[in-house]
Image: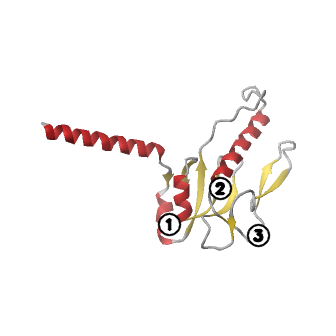
Amino acid sequence: MRDRGSLLIVFVVLLLVLIASSVYAVKVDQEVLNALDDDEEVSVIVVLKDEPIKDRGNVNVVSTGKNERLEIRREMIREVQDDVLERLNIKENNREQERFISNSNNSNSNKKEDLTNNGRTSVASTEDYDFDLKHRYSVVNGFSGKVTKAGLEKLLEDNLVEKVEV
């Protein structure tokens, strides 16, 4: 009888540990892991968790217009992306990296935003980088590029990362 009780306690503890780890775990596509076994880097899409939109003083997010809500969301996405990317060593490319984001004043025009030195660490040596950033999304919270094994480990430790997929 005592052995059954001890076994039950061990089982419950293991079950709780598994549940707790699965709740906080970043989902990584198995293809990413398989590709990193064969190659030094793999092309991925990193999906980030949305943060609650911060109180913006007298602005009521519910009563704001559609364009204003979209711009507030884009700002939140930019902040989350910056938080995650500043923890990675970003590969410095020879060509200028830029992205187009919709200008809130004129929906037909675009402005370019430089990604190379936006407060993040960038490195020139191919052995030292964690992530080769290709694109930052402005409406979906995430970015894409090529990740190394070291970069994937850093992404897995980051609580703002929801999943990494091919």
Q: Specify few, some or many for label 2: CA neighbours under 10 Å numbering under 14, 14-19, or 20 or more.
A: many
Identify the mark nearer the N-term, 2 or 3.
Answer: 2
- Of tags 3 and 1, the one toward the viewer is 3
In the image, residue 64 lies at what x, y percent?
Answer: 77, 29
Tell me which residue sits at (78%, 66%) in the image: 96
Q: Is residue 110 left or right of residue 128?
A: right
Which structural element holds mark 2?
helix
Identify the mark nearer the N-term, 2 or 1.
Answer: 1
Tell me which residue sits at (69%, 35%) in the image: 54
Q: Report the quarter where the N terminus lies.
A: top left
Q: Quadrant of residue 41?
A: bottom right
Identify residue type, mark 2.
Leu
Q: Specify few, some or many for label 1: CA neighbours under 10 Å numbering under 14, 14-19, or 20 or more.
A: some
Q: Report the quarter where the C terminus lies.
A: bottom right
- Of tags 2 and 1, the one toward the viewer is 2
Q: Quadrant of residue 66?
A: top right
Tell me which residue sits at (75%, 57%) in the image: 118
The front one of 32 and 72 is 72
Name the residue beneath numbered marker 1. Answer: 35
Name the residue beneath numbered marker 2. Answer: 85
Tell me which residue sits at (48%, 71%) in the image: 38
Q: Marks 2 and 3: CB-CB under 8 Å? A: no
Q: CA distance from mark 3 to mark 1?
A: 26 Å
- In the picture shown, does residue 119 fall above or below 9? below
Identify residue type, mark 1.
Ala
